[in-house]
Image (cartoon, helix red, strand yellow):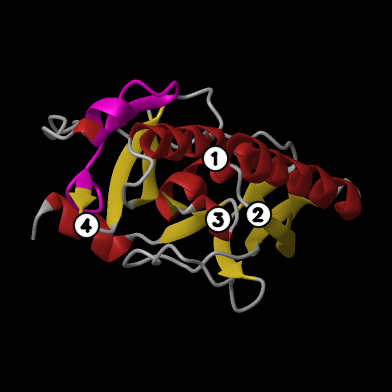
Amino acid sequence: MTTAEAWHATDRLLPLGDAADGTWIAERTVRDLLTRAALNVRGVAPGRPGFRLADDGARSSVPVPPGGLPPGELRITMDLAAVADRPLPQLTGRLRTALLDVAEGTLGLTVAGVDLRVTELLDTAPDRTPPPAPRSRTSPPAPDDPAALTALTVPGVAALTDAFGPPLQRTSARIRIEVAVTTGHRALTVARALRTALTEADPAGPEVTVLISEFH
């Protein structure tokens, strides 16, 4: 199994923005960022974030990539342990705010709500040591394709990546391009700028789908 196949077998793609944005982001990347945000909330020990569509998803002219959820509002779920000497509504409120700040602000996910479940009360404050930062994958060489060269000029595009297959796949009707986003840039803003740049470079060209695999 290739590295790309291994990633594809263990990861999903979550819709970023709305149906018109034609963009998806790796679930493991979202999960890592939300976990780190949750660990900054004092008094809680967060579990693994989960994601599901709030409804059946929206129709889109852009095909859903393999392993991707259709465009639509997401619900974020998380189990957690909390210290017993603080009001639970206060703790869960802070956690919900932290998760939404990353999901909607840093990334651009469309979130219908955050469902939290307290599964344990703790006598002492939990360990807040963050997990080690994920190691960035080696970026493949940019394909010899004008779309790839254009993508690398877009602010916030750190590199082309191949976590879900070749970094750029082209047919007569569609282009699918996979990128890493520079840390500090909003993922959806970068994706929209990338799609605009590719469309302006070839106005009569193929429909563009953007996959975001990670942050660099």
Image position, residue 130 (x, y; %)? 51, 34
Is residue 8 among what the camera can see?
yes
| SS class, disc 2 | loop
**Tag on residue 188?**
1
Cα separation between marks 4 and 2: 30 Å
Q: Residue furthest front?
A: 204
Q: Look at mark 3 in the image and give the residue it sits on.
A: 20
Cα separation between marks 4 and 1: 25 Å
Amino acid type at image mark 3: Ala
Along the viewing direction, whichever of 60 and 122 lies nearer the viewer = 60
| N-term-proximal mark, 4 vs 3 | 3
| SS class, disc 1 | helix
Image position, residue 49 (x, y; %)? 56, 57
Cα separation between marks 3 and 2: 13 Å
| SS class, disc 4 | loop
Q: In which quarter of the image is the N terminus?
A: bottom left
**Magenta span of residues:** 147-168
